[in-house]
Amino acid sequence: MIGALVEAWAEFRVHRARVLLSLVGVVIAVAALAAVVGVGSIASQAQIEQLERGAGRPATLVLNPPYDPRTGKQADPAKLAAAFDQIVERYSITYAGSVLWSGGQAQFVDGVDAVQLTVVDPAYGPMHRVQLARGDWFSDRDELRLTPALVVSDAVWRRLGSPDLATHPTLTLIGRQPTTGVILGVLPPDPYVGNLQAYLLGSGYAALAPSAAPGASPLPMYEFWVPLELADPLAERIRAEVGAAFGEGWVVDVQRQDYLAWGAGDPLEPVRIVLLAIAGLILLLGALSLVNIALVTVRQRVREIGIRRAFGATAPRVFLAVLLESVVATVIAGFVGVVLAVILVQSDWIQGLIAPGLQDAVPFPVEAAVIGLVAATGVGALAGLLPALVAVRVKVVDAIRY
């Protein structure tokens, strides 16, 4: 095997110009295969992060406000908050908090306009991968502010004249009484959400006390970010403990809302299959070109093969030597293709084009490199099979006379 590999490398060096020209298609195909897998990993991570921004990271449990179906009565807010604090402390849950959507109004230079308010805790940011274009997200210290802290959408920030956050710009919210909040951060522009939006902490909301929007629930829901393997048992524990706190007959709803609980498939799978099919076609064309070159090379080496057979080279030895020539060439081409794919996929321009604002960097997947090299090796073996069979069938006497 070692001798056959050495001979294959020597033949590749002798005919490198001709072989390299035939391997251009293989290099392109392997690069395409590896790049498709690599780009798919980046796009999948971007899709996952987008889903986590909306529904939370796996596993996110949601405790909806309990109610009594017999009377239609809702839970007491103070009692529900106490039950939440007890659960967080008992099970040492690091990331947990309340979420309440409400409506309000804000005073701008050109008049008063409606603003969607989202009342959260500081843990909401890491739980939902909140991204900021500028400024900072809430911290625990912001709950102690006398002036409420705000994180506003890009539309609100531009409506205020795009002020520098270092100057501590403010936004006046109008509820039961006007309250001025300090803007800490600004969300990135969202072409799909052009409405005016602001996040504020529960303490700021309590001080503001705006009138609830029509149909909005006055009670928040509570979210818990817990380990995946503990999601189901913790959901049962939370349901049981909150139910015990409110008594028999109360409906307590605890469920998962993260994307893994939905069982959603990969939306990029059809595109990935099409790209892999195109890359496979290119790889097949490269293999046909390589077969052609290998057959011509074998025809030119008929005399050499005959002399080798005359000096005792067996048919399997000749077959292996010719086969490995194609394999060595395509492995080199596969390596070059994988390197090109890594350079392409890991470039900042490509990653910014595919997944702008990606929070967790995605390394080039090892399976992409393995797929590329295995595909190149397989093509080399298939391309070298026919020339190897032709070389084995050469008769010694006819070859020497050739």
Image (cartoon, helix red, strand yellow):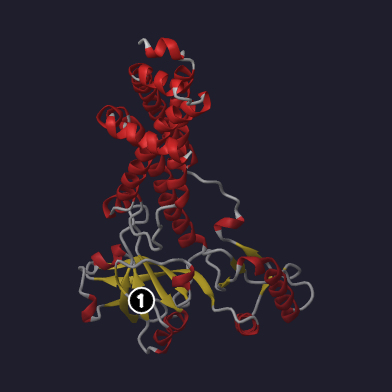
Left of 259 or right of it: where is 201? left
Q: Quadrant of the C terminus?
A: top left
**Label 1 crowding class (10 Å Cα cut-off): few <14, some 14-19, many 20+?**
many
**Residue nearest the observer in this picture, 340 or 10:** 10
Residue at the extreme front of the image, as rendered: 311
Task: Say above or below: 101 vs 180.
Answer: above
Who's the residue at 34% across and 18% down the image? 296
Where is residue 146 drawn, in percent x and y? 37, 89
Residue at figure coordinates x 39%, y 38% from the top left: 6
**Quick check: can you spot residue 376?**
no
Question: Where does residue 13 sit, x and y in percent of width and height?
Answer: 29, 35
Q: Relative to 46, does residue 266 appear above or below in the rendering?
A: above
Q: Would residue 43 be seen by someone viewing this image from the given angle? A: yes
Please provide percent x and percent y for residue 351. 32, 53
Q: Which residue is mark 1?
A: 150
Residue 197: % across, % down: 37, 66
Place residue 148 in its image quadrant.
bottom left
Give the mark count: 1
Taking depth in this image into account, of 38 and 338 the one nearest to the observer is: 338
**Which image quadrant is residue 73 in?**
bottom right
Which amino acid type corresponds to the residue marked 1 in the rendered image? Leu
What residue is rendered at 51% in x and 71% in y? 100
User: What kind of element bears circle 1?
Assistant: strand
Tell me: 81 left or right of 127: right
